[in-house]
Amino acid sequence: MKELLYKKIKDNHLYVWQVTSCSKDLTPKVHLAKEEQNEFRVLKTEKRKVEFLACRLALKTIFSDKLILQHLNSGKPFINEVPHISISHSNNYIAIVFGKENIGLDIELPQEKMQSIISRVLSADEYNLFLKNPSAILACKLWGIKEATLKYIGDKKLSFRQDIKINKDSVSCLNHQLAVYHEIVDQMIVTYVKNKI
């Protein structure tokens, strides 16, 4: 794994890695607890296996070999070492942010096909604004905002179109007003949202 970005965000830490190994090469590098081994055994695809191992390798390297990455019923990850953590992976890249503050995170590769499916996640008003200056990069950023907000809230039942409203430089969802940030790492777009203070 190759670390591409480290950024301190107040009391939080944002990392991005490029994963260059297969699961066979990663397995001996990661000490998995018994419950993690059980989770790993049921994974079917090489992609999921690599994500699973790389994520744990990164976190165990930062914190301790004893760290166990777990998930709430909502799917939101948690570790005992910090109050908040958000994880995203795409195209052999992993992004993790953790610390005292809740931050939602997404990493995506801008692709032309996003322009044709972005209407599925945008409200009518958001889509009309997108159509004024459409691009794969803008579609990727908008998609990332919706995904990062979902991870911030931690409720898979949210409707991207109805519950998550994108404004110029912020996003609102339920009673939350969140600031939006983007980082470009290699060709990937990292999007994160946090409480607007």
Image (cartoon, rainbow, N blue to C red):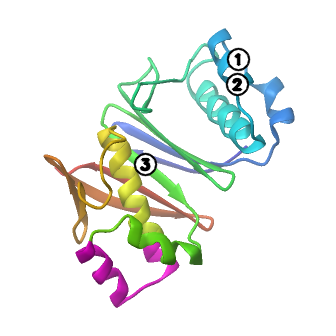
From the image, give the main secondary structure of the stretch colored magenta.
helix
Q: Residues under labels 1 and 2: Cα distance?
A: 5 Å
Q: Give coordinates of residue 41: x percent, y percent.
A: 74, 23
Do the CB atoms of the residues marked 1 and 3 lie less than 8 Å apart? Answer: no
Residue segment shown in magenta? 124-139
Task: Give the residue at the far bottom of this rendering.
Answer: 132
Instruction: Tell which of 164 and 58 is nearer to you.
Output: 164
Marks 1 and 3: which is nearer the front? Answer: 1
Circle 2 SS class: helix
Q: Give coordinates of residue 143: x percent, y percent.
A: 42, 63
Residue bearing the label numbered 3: 105
Marks 3 and 2: which is nearer the front? Answer: 2
Residue bearing the label numbered 2: 40
Q: Earlier in the sequence, mark 1 or mark 3?
A: 1
* Residue positioned 47% across, 52% down in the render: 106
Circle 1 SS class: helix
Residue bearing the label numbered 1: 37
**Kind of residue at badge 1:** Gln
Q: Residues under labels 3 and 2: Cα distance?
A: 23 Å
